[in-house]
Amino acid sequence: MLEGKAEIKDTDMSMKMQIHAMASASQALDKHDVIDYTSIAAHIKKEFDQVYGCGWQCVVGSNFGCFFTHSKGTFIYFALESLNFLIFKGASS
């Protein structure tokens, strides 16, 4: 597992889900090359779909912008190492 601490930038997730999100990100970084953003994001999305039901989205990178609508209690944005992680469950507007 990666050394270093995640920095939560914004969230409305429960503490349990936050811990799961950061652990999933760390596991994905252990399994995939740090520049393979797509595989890292897919790993996290599949984990969250399996545990919390379908509809999760994951964005990974060092520089990105976004605008989205999410279901209440399902959003986290954090940094780990040199990457930013955005995980949320989509919602209709």
Image: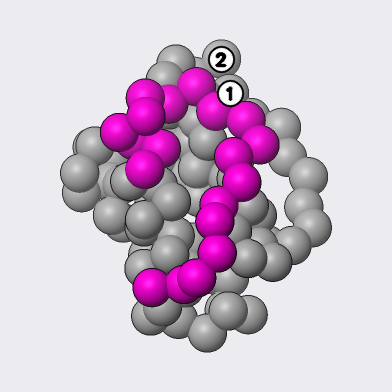
Image location (x, y in percent) of residue 91? 46, 23
Query: How many numbered marks are there?
Result: 2
Residue, x 41% and y 37% (percent of image)?
18
Name which quarter of the figure residue 78 lies in. Answer: top right
Is 89 magenta? The answer is: no
Residue under the image location 37 percent in, 29 percent down: 15
Image quarter hosting the C terminus: top right
| Residue 91 visible at all | no
Picture residue at 50% right of the left edge, 43% below the top: 87
Part of the protein shown in magenta: 1-19
Looking at this rendering, what residue extends furthest in the bottom direction? 33
Tag 1 and tag 2, C-beta contact below 8 Å: yes
**Residue 68 occupies which quadrant of the picture?**
top right
Q: Is residue 54 above or below residue 80?
A: above
Distance between mark 1 and mark 2 Cα atoms: 6 Å
Q: Residue at x 58, y 79 (%)?
A: 34
Which numbered circle lies on residue 69? 1
Badge 1: residue crowd in 10 Å (few <14, some 14–19, many ≥20)? few
**What colouring does the structure picture have?**
one colour
Q: On the image, numbered disc 2 is attached to which residue? A: 93
**Which type of secondary structure does the marked residue at label 1 adopt?**
loop
Choose the circle earlier in sequence order: 1 or 2.
Answer: 1
Residue 72 in sight here: yes
Q: Residue 40: x and y, percent?
A: 48, 68
